[in-house]
Image (cartoon, rainbow, N blue to C red):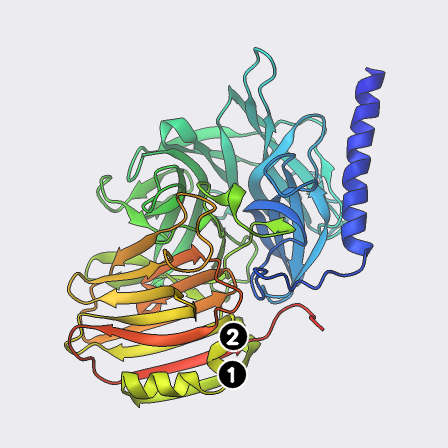
Amino acid sequence: MECLQVGRLIYLLSLTIAGFEAQHRSTPLYDEPYRPQYHFSPRQNWTNDPNGLVYFEGEYHLFFQFNPLRDEWGHMSWGHAVSRDLLHWRELPVALPEENGIMIFTGSTVIDQRNTSGFCTGKKPCLIAVYTGYAPPKGSKSGLQTQNLAFSNDRGRTWTKYEHNPVLNLNLADFRDPKVFWSDQAACWVMLVSLPNDHKVAFYRSPDLKHWNHVSDFGPAGATGGQWECPELFELPVDGSRAKTRWVLKVGLNPGGLQGGSGEQYFIGSFDGARFVNDNPSSLTLWTDYGKDCYCALTLNGLPRNQPQVMIGWMNNWQCAAAVPTHPWRGQMTIPRKLSLRTTIEGVRLVEQPIKSLQALRSQSIVLTNQSIEELNRNLSEGDVAKGRAFELDSTISLGRAEEVGWKLLTADGSYLVVGYNQRNEKVFVDRTHAGVTAFSKDFPARTAATLPLHGDSLRLEILVDRCSVEIFAQGGRVTITDLVFPLADARGIRMYLKGGQPGPVSVNVSNFRSVYSIP
Protein backbone atom coordinates (compact mmCIF):
# COMPACT_ATOMS: atom_id res chain seq x y z
CA MET A 1 0.00 0.00 0.00
CA GLU A 2 2.83 2.40 0.86
CA CYS A 3 4.45 1.74 -2.55
CA LEU A 4 1.16 2.43 -4.30
CA GLN A 5 0.80 5.74 -2.46
CA VAL A 6 4.36 6.73 -3.33
CA GLY A 7 3.75 5.80 -6.97
CA ARG A 8 0.60 7.88 -7.05
CA LEU A 9 2.44 10.88 -5.58
CA ILE A 10 5.23 10.55 -8.14
CA TYR A 11 2.74 10.43 -11.01
CA LEU A 12 0.76 13.44 -9.76
CA LEU A 13 4.03 15.32 -9.25
CA SER A 14 5.01 14.56 -12.85
CA LEU A 15 1.71 16.05 -14.06
CA THR A 16 2.26 19.14 -11.92
CA ILE A 17 5.80 19.62 -13.22
CA ALA A 18 4.66 19.13 -16.82
CA GLY A 19 1.89 21.70 -16.38
CA PHE A 20 4.25 24.14 -14.60
CA GLU A 21 6.90 23.87 -17.30
CA ALA A 22 4.33 24.37 -20.05
CA GLN A 23 3.06 27.50 -18.28
CA HIS A 24 6.32 29.11 -17.23
CA ARG A 25 9.08 28.19 -19.65
CA SER A 26 9.89 30.59 -22.48
CA THR A 27 6.76 30.98 -24.59
CA PRO A 28 6.75 28.78 -27.73
CA LEU A 29 6.51 30.62 -31.02
CA TYR A 30 3.43 28.67 -32.12
CA ASP A 31 4.93 28.99 -35.57
CA GLU A 32 5.84 25.39 -36.35
CA PRO A 33 5.29 24.47 -40.05
CA TYR A 34 1.84 22.93 -39.55
CA ARG A 35 0.76 24.82 -36.44
CA PRO A 36 -2.78 26.20 -36.96
CA GLN A 37 -2.92 29.95 -36.53
CA TYR A 38 -6.60 30.47 -35.69
CA HIS A 39 -7.73 27.01 -34.53
CA PHE A 40 -7.08 25.77 -31.01
CA SER A 41 -4.25 23.29 -30.49
CA PRO A 42 -2.45 22.53 -27.22
CA ARG A 43 1.10 23.78 -26.70
CA GLN A 44 2.36 20.23 -26.81
CA ASN A 45 1.32 16.57 -26.51
CA TRP A 46 -1.77 14.70 -27.59
CA THR A 47 -5.38 15.89 -27.70
CA ASN A 48 -8.58 14.36 -29.05
CA ASP A 49 -12.24 15.01 -28.10
CA PRO A 50 -13.38 18.41 -26.85
CA ASN A 51 -14.98 18.05 -23.41
CA GLY A 52 -17.24 20.03 -21.11
CA LEU A 53 -17.74 23.10 -23.30
CA VAL A 54 -19.39 25.79 -21.18
CA TYR A 55 -19.81 29.57 -20.97
CA PHE A 56 -19.53 30.89 -17.41
CA GLU A 57 -19.06 34.41 -16.04
CA GLY A 58 -17.80 35.89 -19.30
CA GLU A 59 -15.47 33.04 -20.25
CA TYR A 60 -15.77 30.20 -22.72
CA HIS A 61 -14.24 27.02 -21.32
CA LEU A 62 -12.79 24.37 -23.59
CA PHE A 63 -11.79 21.17 -21.85
CA PHE A 64 -10.25 18.48 -24.02
CA GLN A 65 -8.96 14.93 -23.94
CA PHE A 66 -5.26 15.35 -23.19
CA ASN A 67 -2.15 13.31 -22.51
CA PRO A 68 0.00 15.52 -20.26
CA LEU A 69 3.09 13.39 -20.84
CA ARG A 70 3.53 12.78 -24.57
CA ASP A 71 2.12 13.23 -28.09
CA GLU A 72 0.31 9.90 -28.27
CA TRP A 73 -2.93 8.60 -26.78
CA GLY A 74 -2.68 7.59 -23.12
CA HIS A 75 -2.95 8.87 -19.52
CA MET A 76 -6.15 10.59 -20.60
CA SER A 77 -6.97 13.70 -18.58
CA TRP A 78 -8.91 16.90 -19.14
CA GLY A 79 -6.80 19.71 -20.55
CA HIS A 80 -8.26 23.20 -20.16
CA ALA A 81 -8.30 26.50 -22.04
CA VAL A 82 -10.38 29.66 -21.68
CA SER A 83 -11.33 32.41 -24.12
CA ARG A 84 -13.36 35.63 -24.30
CA ASP A 85 -14.17 35.28 -28.02
CA LEU A 86 -13.86 31.55 -28.92
CA LEU A 87 -10.72 32.35 -30.94
CA HIS A 88 -7.99 33.56 -28.59
CA TRP A 89 -7.48 30.71 -26.13
CA ARG A 90 -5.36 30.75 -22.99
CA GLU A 91 -4.23 27.27 -22.04
CA LEU A 92 -4.44 26.50 -18.31
CA PRO A 93 -2.99 23.62 -16.26
CA VAL A 94 -4.64 20.19 -16.46
CA ALA A 95 -8.12 20.37 -14.90
CA LEU A 96 -8.87 16.70 -14.22
CA PRO A 97 -5.83 14.42 -14.15
CA GLU A 98 -5.74 10.66 -14.47
CA GLU A 99 -5.57 9.37 -10.91
CA ASN A 100 -5.49 6.03 -9.12
CA GLY A 101 -5.42 4.24 -12.44
CA ILE A 102 -8.66 5.92 -13.62
CA MET A 103 -8.42 7.84 -16.88
CA ILE A 104 -10.71 10.80 -17.51
CA PHE A 105 -12.76 10.30 -20.67
CA THR A 106 -15.21 12.61 -22.46
CA GLY A 107 -18.07 14.37 -20.67
CA SER A 108 -19.90 17.63 -19.91
CA THR A 109 -19.60 20.66 -17.69
CA VAL A 110 -22.76 22.23 -16.27
CA ILE A 111 -23.54 25.32 -14.19
CA ASP A 112 -25.38 24.37 -11.00
CA GLN A 113 -27.40 27.58 -10.63
CA ARG A 114 -29.62 26.21 -7.83
CA ASN A 115 -26.93 24.25 -5.98
CA THR A 116 -28.93 21.08 -6.49
CA SER A 117 -25.75 19.08 -5.92
CA GLY A 118 -24.75 20.73 -2.66
CA PHE A 119 -21.24 21.29 -4.08
CA CYS A 120 -21.51 25.07 -4.43
CA THR A 121 -20.21 27.26 -1.60
CA GLY A 122 -21.75 30.59 -0.63
CA LYS A 123 -24.54 31.96 -2.80
CA LYS A 124 -22.83 31.68 -6.17
CA PRO A 125 -23.33 28.86 -8.70
CA CYS A 126 -20.49 26.45 -9.34
CA LEU A 127 -19.20 24.37 -12.24
CA ILE A 128 -19.69 20.61 -12.19
CA ALA A 129 -17.98 18.21 -14.58
CA VAL A 130 -19.73 14.95 -15.43
CA TYR A 131 -17.23 12.59 -17.05
CA THR A 132 -16.56 8.97 -17.86
CA GLY A 133 -13.96 7.33 -15.68
CA TYR A 134 -12.09 4.49 -17.39
CA ALA A 135 -10.29 1.71 -15.57
CA PRO A 136 -8.30 -0.25 -18.20
CA PRO A 137 -8.33 -4.09 -18.23
CA LYS A 138 -5.99 -5.64 -15.72
CA GLY A 139 -5.10 -9.31 -15.84
CA SER A 140 -8.30 -11.30 -16.19
CA LYS A 141 -10.37 -8.29 -15.17
CA SER A 142 -12.06 -6.44 -18.04
CA GLY A 143 -12.08 -2.67 -18.37
CA LEU A 144 -14.78 -0.57 -16.69
CA GLN A 145 -16.42 2.72 -17.72
CA THR A 146 -18.51 4.68 -15.21
CA GLN A 147 -19.97 8.19 -14.87
CA ASN A 148 -18.43 10.51 -12.30
CA LEU A 149 -18.50 14.05 -10.90
CA ALA A 150 -16.00 16.80 -10.09
CA PHE A 151 -16.74 20.36 -9.01
CA SER A 152 -15.11 23.79 -8.99
CA ASN A 153 -15.95 26.90 -6.94
CA ASP A 154 -13.28 29.16 -8.45
CA ARG A 155 -14.40 29.58 -12.08
CA GLY A 156 -12.91 26.28 -13.17
CA ARG A 157 -9.36 26.89 -11.99
CA THR A 158 -9.24 24.04 -9.48
CA TRP A 159 -11.35 20.91 -9.28
CA THR A 160 -12.34 18.38 -6.63
CA LYS A 161 -13.52 14.89 -7.54
CA TYR A 162 -16.63 13.70 -5.73
CA GLU A 163 -15.64 11.36 -2.92
CA HIS A 164 -18.50 8.96 -3.66
CA ASN A 165 -17.78 8.46 -7.36
CA PRO A 166 -19.01 6.81 -9.50
CA VAL A 167 -22.57 8.13 -9.60
CA LEU A 168 -23.63 5.78 -12.40
CA ASN A 169 -22.16 2.30 -12.89
CA LEU A 170 -23.65 -0.43 -15.09
CA ASN A 171 -20.51 -2.61 -14.77
CA LEU A 172 -19.87 -2.26 -18.50
CA ALA A 173 -16.60 -1.99 -20.40
CA ASP A 174 -18.24 0.37 -22.93
CA PHE A 175 -20.57 2.98 -21.42
CA ARG A 176 -19.34 6.51 -21.98
CA ASP A 177 -19.42 10.19 -22.96
CA PRO A 178 -22.22 11.75 -20.88
CA LYS A 179 -23.92 14.87 -22.20
CA VAL A 180 -25.72 16.61 -19.32
CA PHE A 181 -27.96 19.68 -19.20
CA TRP A 182 -30.77 21.13 -17.08
CA SER A 183 -34.26 20.62 -18.54
CA ASP A 184 -36.77 23.30 -17.59
CA GLN A 185 -39.51 21.12 -19.04
CA ALA A 186 -38.66 18.18 -16.80
CA ALA A 187 -37.38 20.34 -13.91
CA CYS A 188 -34.34 18.10 -13.49
CA TRP A 189 -30.96 17.22 -14.95
CA VAL A 190 -30.90 15.11 -18.10
CA MET A 191 -28.02 12.84 -19.10
CA LEU A 192 -27.61 11.04 -22.38
CA VAL A 193 -24.78 8.52 -22.54
CA SER A 194 -23.73 6.05 -25.19
CA LEU A 195 -24.03 2.28 -25.18
CA PRO A 196 -21.47 1.92 -27.99
CA ASN A 197 -21.87 -1.73 -28.93
CA ASP A 198 -25.68 -1.65 -28.76
CA HIS A 199 -25.85 1.43 -31.04
CA LYS A 200 -28.01 3.13 -28.45
CA VAL A 201 -28.14 6.37 -26.52
CA ALA A 202 -29.48 5.91 -22.98
CA PHE A 203 -31.36 8.76 -21.25
CA TYR A 204 -31.26 9.34 -17.48
CA ARG A 205 -32.69 12.01 -15.16
CA SER A 206 -31.58 13.31 -11.78
CA PRO A 207 -32.64 15.99 -9.26
CA ASP A 208 -29.10 16.50 -7.92
CA LEU A 209 -26.54 15.08 -10.42
CA LYS A 210 -25.76 12.31 -7.92
CA HIS A 211 -28.73 9.96 -8.24
CA TRP A 212 -29.80 8.91 -11.73
CA ASN A 213 -32.85 7.06 -13.06
CA HIS A 214 -33.05 5.51 -16.51
CA VAL A 215 -36.01 6.87 -18.52
CA SER A 216 -35.55 5.80 -22.17
CA ASP A 217 -33.25 4.61 -24.97
CA PHE A 218 -32.82 5.72 -28.56
CA GLY A 219 -31.50 3.44 -31.31
CA PRO A 220 -30.38 1.57 -33.23
CA ALA A 221 -31.03 3.92 -36.16
CA GLY A 222 -29.15 5.52 -39.02
CA ALA A 223 -25.58 4.31 -39.44
CA THR A 224 -24.54 1.40 -37.21
CA GLY A 225 -21.26 0.28 -38.80
CA GLY A 226 -19.17 1.05 -35.71
CA GLN A 227 -19.42 1.99 -32.05
CA TRP A 228 -21.70 4.89 -31.10
CA GLU A 229 -19.90 7.60 -29.10
CA CYS A 230 -20.05 11.26 -28.06
CA PRO A 231 -23.84 11.78 -28.02
CA GLU A 232 -25.10 15.36 -28.03
CA LEU A 233 -28.62 16.85 -27.81
CA PHE A 234 -29.68 20.46 -28.38
CA GLU A 235 -32.73 22.48 -29.44
CA LEU A 236 -32.69 24.91 -32.37
CA PRO A 237 -35.23 27.21 -34.04
CA VAL A 238 -36.33 26.20 -37.54
CA ASP A 239 -35.73 28.89 -40.18
CA GLY A 240 -34.97 31.38 -37.41
CA SER A 241 -38.39 31.12 -35.78
CA ARG A 242 -38.44 30.63 -32.02
CA ALA A 243 -42.07 29.58 -32.37
CA LYS A 244 -40.99 26.46 -34.24
CA THR A 245 -38.11 24.42 -32.85
CA ARG A 246 -36.74 20.90 -33.23
CA TRP A 247 -34.18 18.90 -31.29
CA VAL A 248 -30.96 17.57 -32.83
CA LEU A 249 -29.47 14.33 -31.51
CA LYS A 250 -25.89 13.93 -32.74
CA VAL A 251 -24.01 10.61 -32.44
CA GLY A 252 -20.37 9.80 -33.21
CA LEU A 253 -19.55 6.63 -35.12
CA ASN A 254 -16.15 4.91 -35.01
CA PRO A 255 -15.40 3.22 -37.30
CA GLY A 256 -18.16 3.38 -39.90
CA GLY A 257 -17.97 7.07 -40.80
CA LEU A 258 -19.12 8.03 -44.28
CA GLN A 259 -15.57 8.61 -45.55
CA GLY A 260 -13.97 5.82 -43.52
CA GLY A 261 -12.85 5.76 -39.90
CA SER A 262 -14.63 8.11 -37.50
CA GLY A 263 -17.56 10.33 -38.49
CA GLU A 264 -20.78 11.76 -37.08
CA GLN A 265 -24.47 11.53 -37.86
CA TYR A 266 -27.49 13.41 -36.56
CA PHE A 267 -31.20 12.90 -36.09
CA ILE A 268 -33.91 15.59 -36.02
CA GLY A 269 -36.95 15.14 -33.81
CA SER A 270 -38.74 16.02 -30.58
CA PHE A 271 -37.70 15.69 -26.94
CA ASP A 272 -40.09 15.87 -23.97
CA GLY A 273 -37.50 15.78 -21.20
CA ALA A 274 -37.38 11.99 -21.18
CA ARG A 275 -37.61 10.56 -24.69
CA PHE A 276 -36.25 11.56 -28.10
CA VAL A 277 -38.49 10.75 -31.10
CA ASN A 278 -36.97 10.79 -34.58
CA ASP A 279 -38.91 12.75 -37.23
CA ASN A 280 -37.41 10.72 -40.08
CA PRO A 281 -37.37 7.02 -40.97
CA SER A 282 -34.79 5.14 -38.88
CA SER A 283 -33.05 4.08 -42.10
CA LEU A 284 -32.18 7.68 -43.03
CA THR A 285 -28.61 8.75 -42.21
CA LEU A 286 -27.76 12.45 -42.01
CA TRP A 287 -24.09 13.42 -41.63
CA THR A 288 -22.87 16.46 -39.74
CA ASP A 289 -19.71 16.71 -41.86
CA TYR A 290 -18.71 15.08 -45.16
CA GLY A 291 -14.95 15.23 -44.64
CA LYS A 292 -12.69 12.80 -42.85
CA ASP A 293 -11.61 15.03 -39.99
CA CYS A 294 -14.41 16.26 -37.75
CA TYR A 295 -15.32 14.08 -34.76
CA CYS A 296 -16.93 14.25 -31.33
CA ALA A 297 -18.28 17.75 -31.97
CA LEU A 298 -19.99 19.22 -28.88
CA THR A 299 -22.08 22.30 -28.11
CA LEU A 300 -21.69 24.80 -25.28
CA ASN A 301 -23.75 24.74 -22.11
CA GLY A 302 -24.60 28.04 -20.46
CA LEU A 303 -24.81 30.27 -23.54
CA PRO A 304 -26.95 33.43 -23.17
CA ARG A 305 -30.42 32.91 -24.64
CA ASN A 306 -29.85 35.44 -27.41
CA GLN A 307 -26.60 33.82 -28.57
CA PRO A 308 -26.77 31.16 -31.34
CA GLN A 309 -25.69 27.66 -30.42
CA VAL A 310 -22.06 26.87 -31.21
CA MET A 311 -20.34 23.54 -31.86
CA ILE A 312 -16.63 22.61 -31.77
CA GLY A 313 -15.21 19.28 -32.93
CA TRP A 314 -11.92 17.40 -32.89
CA MET A 315 -10.25 17.93 -36.26
CA ASN A 316 -8.87 14.46 -36.86
CA ASN A 317 -9.78 10.86 -37.68
CA TRP A 318 -8.96 7.78 -35.61
CA GLN A 319 -7.65 6.11 -38.79
CA CYS A 320 -4.66 8.47 -38.98
CA ALA A 321 -4.55 10.46 -35.74
CA ALA A 322 -1.51 8.72 -34.25
CA ALA A 323 0.58 9.34 -37.36
CA VAL A 324 -0.11 12.94 -38.41
CA PRO A 325 3.21 14.76 -38.99
CA THR A 326 2.89 17.53 -36.39
CA HIS A 327 5.24 18.30 -33.50
CA PRO A 328 5.35 18.91 -30.54
CA TRP A 329 1.54 18.47 -30.48
CA ARG A 330 -0.95 16.13 -32.10
CA GLY A 331 -4.57 17.15 -32.48
CA GLN A 332 -6.54 20.38 -32.86
CA MET A 333 -10.12 21.67 -32.86
CA THR A 334 -12.36 22.84 -35.67
CA ILE A 335 -13.37 26.46 -35.95
CA PRO A 336 -16.35 27.13 -33.66
CA ARG A 337 -19.48 26.84 -35.80
CA LYS A 338 -22.82 28.59 -35.45
CA LEU A 339 -25.69 26.10 -35.77
CA SER A 340 -29.17 26.50 -37.22
CA LEU A 341 -31.94 24.44 -38.81
CA ARG A 342 -33.17 25.22 -42.31
CA THR A 343 -36.09 23.83 -44.27
CA THR A 344 -34.87 22.43 -47.61
CA ILE A 345 -36.50 20.46 -50.40
CA GLU A 346 -35.14 17.34 -48.71
CA GLY A 347 -36.53 18.34 -45.29
CA VAL A 348 -35.26 20.15 -42.20
CA ARG A 349 -31.47 20.00 -42.14
CA LEU A 350 -28.63 21.17 -39.88
CA VAL A 351 -26.68 24.19 -41.15
CA GLU A 352 -23.17 25.06 -39.91
CA GLN A 353 -21.37 28.36 -40.43
CA PRO A 354 -18.13 29.87 -39.07
CA ILE A 355 -18.72 32.19 -36.12
CA LYS A 356 -18.86 35.86 -37.13
CA SER A 357 -16.06 36.92 -34.76
CA LEU A 358 -13.65 35.14 -37.13
CA GLN A 359 -13.98 38.18 -39.41
CA ALA A 360 -12.02 40.25 -36.87
CA LEU A 361 -8.88 38.30 -37.82
CA ARG A 362 -8.94 39.48 -41.43
CA SER A 363 -5.91 41.52 -42.45
CA GLN A 364 -5.11 42.00 -46.14
CA SER A 365 -8.00 41.32 -48.51
CA ILE A 366 -8.63 41.27 -52.23
CA VAL A 367 -12.13 41.51 -53.70
CA LEU A 368 -12.72 40.57 -57.34
CA THR A 369 -16.22 40.74 -58.83
CA ASN A 370 -17.80 39.53 -62.08
CA GLN A 371 -14.55 38.32 -63.60
CA SER A 372 -13.66 35.63 -66.07
CA ILE A 373 -11.42 32.82 -64.88
CA GLU A 374 -8.48 34.25 -66.83
CA GLU A 375 -8.89 37.70 -65.26
CA LEU A 376 -9.38 36.18 -61.84
CA ASN A 377 -6.24 34.03 -61.92
CA ARG A 378 -4.14 36.90 -63.25
CA ASN A 379 -5.26 39.18 -60.43
CA LEU A 380 -4.80 36.49 -57.80
CA SER A 381 -1.22 35.88 -58.95
CA GLU A 382 -0.29 39.49 -58.22
CA GLY A 383 0.44 40.81 -54.75
CA ASP A 384 0.65 38.96 -51.43
CA VAL A 385 -2.99 38.49 -50.43
CA ALA A 386 -3.52 35.18 -52.22
CA LYS A 387 -0.20 33.72 -51.10
CA GLY A 388 -0.87 33.09 -47.42
CA ARG A 389 -1.32 29.76 -45.61
CA ALA A 390 -3.96 30.98 -43.16
CA PHE A 391 -6.80 32.56 -45.11
CA GLU A 392 -10.46 32.67 -46.04
CA LEU A 393 -11.71 32.33 -49.62
CA ASP A 394 -15.37 33.20 -50.21
CA SER A 395 -16.44 32.68 -53.81
CA THR A 396 -19.68 32.85 -55.77
CA ILE A 397 -19.62 31.15 -59.17
CA SER A 398 -22.28 31.24 -61.86
CA LEU A 399 -21.87 27.72 -63.22
CA GLY A 400 -23.28 28.24 -66.68
CA ARG A 401 -22.41 25.23 -68.85
CA ALA A 402 -19.28 24.26 -66.90
CA GLU A 403 -19.10 20.59 -66.02
CA GLU A 404 -16.72 21.16 -63.11
CA VAL A 405 -15.26 24.25 -61.48
CA GLY A 406 -13.26 24.83 -58.36
CA TRP A 407 -10.06 25.92 -56.70
CA LYS A 408 -6.54 24.60 -56.56
CA LEU A 409 -5.12 25.77 -53.24
CA LEU A 410 -1.69 25.59 -51.59
CA THR A 411 -0.07 24.94 -54.95
CA ALA A 412 3.66 24.31 -55.46
CA ASP A 413 5.77 22.01 -57.68
CA GLY A 414 2.87 19.83 -58.81
CA SER A 415 1.38 19.68 -55.31
CA TYR A 416 -2.09 21.11 -54.74
CA LEU A 417 -5.34 20.75 -52.80
CA VAL A 418 -8.54 20.72 -54.84
CA VAL A 419 -11.92 22.09 -53.71
CA GLY A 420 -14.46 21.71 -56.49
CA TYR A 421 -18.00 21.13 -57.66
CA ASN A 422 -19.14 18.78 -60.41
CA GLN A 423 -22.38 20.02 -61.93
CA ARG A 424 -23.13 16.74 -63.70
CA ASN A 425 -23.22 14.59 -60.55
CA GLU A 426 -24.12 17.47 -58.19
CA LYS A 427 -21.24 16.84 -55.81
CA VAL A 428 -19.00 19.22 -53.91
CA PHE A 429 -15.64 17.66 -53.02
CA VAL A 430 -12.18 18.03 -51.52
CA ASP A 431 -9.26 16.10 -53.02
CA ARG A 432 -6.06 15.96 -50.96
CA THR A 433 -4.41 13.07 -52.81
CA HIS A 434 -1.86 15.47 -54.41
CA ALA A 435 -1.57 17.87 -51.47
CA GLY A 436 1.95 17.50 -50.12
CA VAL A 437 2.70 14.98 -47.38
CA THR A 438 0.28 12.03 -47.56
CA ALA A 439 2.31 8.81 -47.20
CA PHE A 440 2.32 8.63 -43.38
CA SER A 441 -0.94 6.60 -43.47
CA LYS A 442 -2.55 4.52 -46.21
CA ASP A 443 -5.91 5.99 -45.19
CA PHE A 444 -4.88 9.63 -45.52
CA PRO A 445 -4.85 10.27 -49.30
CA ALA A 446 -8.53 10.76 -50.03
CA ARG A 447 -11.19 12.52 -52.06
CA THR A 448 -14.20 13.36 -49.90
CA ALA A 449 -17.50 14.41 -51.45
CA ALA A 450 -21.11 15.30 -50.67
CA THR A 451 -24.20 15.46 -52.85
CA LEU A 452 -25.37 19.08 -53.11
CA PRO A 453 -28.22 19.93 -55.47
CA LEU A 454 -28.03 23.68 -56.09
CA HIS A 455 -31.61 24.33 -57.27
CA GLY A 456 -30.17 27.13 -59.38
CA ASP A 457 -27.06 28.27 -61.21
CA SER A 458 -25.07 29.86 -58.40
CA LEU A 459 -22.49 28.04 -56.26
CA ARG A 460 -21.13 29.61 -53.08
CA LEU A 461 -18.06 28.15 -51.39
CA GLU A 462 -16.68 29.54 -48.13
CA ILE A 463 -13.26 27.98 -47.61
CA LEU A 464 -11.11 28.29 -44.48
CA VAL A 465 -7.46 27.24 -44.79
CA ASP A 466 -5.19 27.17 -41.74
CA ARG A 467 -1.78 25.68 -42.57
CA CYS A 468 -2.78 22.03 -42.05
CA SER A 469 -6.54 22.09 -42.53
CA VAL A 470 -9.36 23.07 -44.84
CA GLU A 471 -13.02 23.60 -43.87
CA ILE A 472 -15.63 24.01 -46.60
CA PHE A 473 -19.03 25.63 -45.99
CA ALA A 474 -21.01 25.18 -49.21
CA GLN A 475 -24.22 27.07 -50.02
CA GLY A 476 -24.22 28.95 -46.74
CA GLY A 477 -23.37 25.88 -44.65
CA ARG A 478 -25.84 23.37 -46.10
CA VAL A 479 -22.85 21.06 -46.56
CA THR A 480 -19.65 21.09 -44.51
CA ILE A 481 -16.43 19.25 -45.38
CA THR A 482 -13.49 19.20 -42.97
CA ASP A 483 -10.12 17.71 -43.94
CA LEU A 484 -6.57 17.89 -42.68
CA VAL A 485 -3.87 18.62 -45.25
CA PHE A 486 -0.07 18.78 -44.94
CA PRO A 487 1.24 20.89 -47.84
CA LEU A 488 4.80 21.41 -48.97
CA ALA A 489 6.73 24.21 -47.26
CA ASP A 490 6.42 26.64 -50.18
CA ALA A 491 2.82 25.75 -51.13
CA ARG A 492 1.02 29.09 -51.24
CA GLY A 493 -0.69 29.64 -54.59
CA ILE A 494 -4.42 29.92 -55.41
CA ARG A 495 -5.90 29.26 -58.85
CA MET A 496 -9.38 28.64 -60.16
CA TYR A 497 -9.77 25.73 -62.59
CA LEU A 498 -12.38 24.61 -65.10
CA LYS A 499 -13.39 21.37 -66.82
CA GLY A 500 -15.80 21.30 -69.75
CA GLY A 501 -17.98 24.22 -70.87
CA GLN A 502 -17.84 27.81 -69.73
CA PRO A 503 -19.07 29.24 -66.43
CA GLY A 504 -20.60 32.64 -66.01
CA PRO A 505 -19.07 35.48 -63.94
CA VAL A 506 -17.12 34.73 -60.78
CA SER A 507 -16.77 36.86 -57.64
CA VAL A 508 -14.28 36.13 -54.88
CA ASN A 509 -13.08 37.66 -51.62
CA VAL A 510 -9.73 36.39 -50.30
CA SER A 511 -8.58 37.52 -46.85
CA ASN A 512 -5.40 36.65 -45.03
CA PHE A 513 -5.91 35.96 -41.33
CA ARG A 514 -3.81 37.33 -38.52
CA SER A 515 -2.52 34.75 -36.08
CA VAL A 516 -4.24 34.53 -32.70
CA TYR A 517 -0.75 34.06 -31.25
CA SER A 518 1.86 36.75 -30.72
CA ILE A 519 4.51 35.69 -33.23
CA PRO A 520 7.55 37.99 -33.51
Badge 2 marks a residue whose secondary structure is: loop
Residue 24 image position (x, y, % from top left) = 82, 55
Q: In this view, does 337 lie above or below 209?
A: below
Q: Residue furthest top?
A: 140
Residue 372 image position (x, y, % from top left) = 27, 86
**Camera-nearest residue between 416 and 88:** 416
Q: Residue furthest front?
A: 413
From the viewer's perspective, is 250 left or right of 8?
Answer: left
Q: Quadrant of the C terminus?
A: bottom right
- Label 2 is placed on what type of residue? Gly
The answer to which quarter of the image holds residue 254 is top left
Q: Name the residue located 36 percent from the left edge and 70 percent from the top edge.
A: 408
Judge whether residue 470 can be spotted in this image: yes
Judge whether residue 244 can be spotted in this image: no
Badge 1 marks a residue whose secondary structure is: loop
> Marks 2 and 1, Cα distance to the nearest angstrom?
7 Å
Q: How crowded is mark 2: few (under 14 residues within 10 Å), some or many (20 or more)?
A: many
- Label 1 is placed on what type of residue? Asp
Residue 288 image position (x, y, % from top left) = 36, 52
Residue at numbered disc 1:
384
From the viewer's perspective, is 385 left or right of 4?
Answer: left
The number of numbered discs placed on residues in the rendered structure image is 2
Q: Quadrant of the N terminus?
A: top right
Q: In this view, does 407 lie above or below 214?
A: below
Q: Is residue 213 above or below residue 90?
A: above
**Camera-nearest residue between 399 and 242:** 399
Q: Name the residue located 29 percent from the left edge and 49 percent from the top edge.
A: 286
Residue at numbered disc 2:
388
The answer to which quarter of the image holds residue 273 is top left
Residue 370 image position (x, y, % from top left) = 29, 89
